[in-house]
Amino acid sequence: MDCRVVHVEHILEEFPHMRQAVLEIDARTIGIDQRLQHVETNMVTKADLAFYDRKIGEHDREIYMMKNR
């Protein structure tokens, strides 16, 4: 029984350190989440790339046709 009491006391002593570690991880996670939201907001989508590819192709064809008149 005495061993169990010592073990519980040890856990209670470590609890503030564990809580601080969890709070630090939480703060880092929030920062990572904010950066991810920024990246998702500013990143190019496949639809954007397909649109630009199509437009560039159209403009290249128009330029080619103008040069060959």
Image (tube, rainbow, N blue to C red):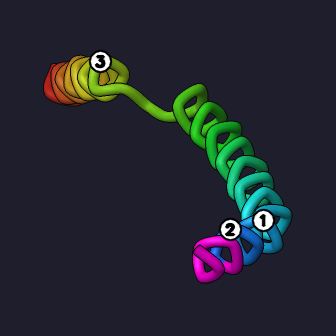
Residue at screen point 85% across, 63% down: 16
Residue 59 is at least partly visible in this image: no
Marks 3 and 1: in contact by CB < 8 Å? no
Asked whether residue 45 is drawn in magenta, I would say no
Disc 2 + disc 1, Cβ < 8 Å: yes
Q: Nearer the viewer, residue 52 or 11?
A: 11
Report the Cα–Cα distance between label 2 and label 1.
Answer: 6 Å
Is 5 inside the magenta-drawn segment?
A: yes
Mark 1–mark 3 distance (CA, rounded to whole Å) = 55 Å
Residue at mark 1: 12
Q: Secondary structure at mark 3?
A: helix
Binning the other alpha carbons within 10 Å of mark 2 as few (below 14), some (14 to 19) or many (20 upward) gives: few
Q: Is residue 27 above or below residue 51?
A: below
Q: Secondary structure at mark 1?
A: helix
Among the two numbered marks 3 and 2 on one chain, the one whose residue lies closer to the N terminus:
2
Q: Which picture quadrant has residue 11?
A: bottom right
- Between marks 2 and 1 in the image, the one whose residue lies nearer the viewer: 2
Image coords of residue 10 (percent x, y): 73, 77
Q: Does dot 2 land on a helix, a strand or a loop?
A: helix
Quarter residue 13 falls in: bottom right
Q: Which residues are magenta?
A: 1-6
On screen, residue 31 above or below 17: above
Q: Who comes first in sequence, dot 1 or dot 3?
A: 1
The residue to which callout 2 is attached is 8
Instruction: Tell me, for residue 47, which label it has, or none.
Output: 3
Q: Is residue 16 left or right of residue 48?
A: right
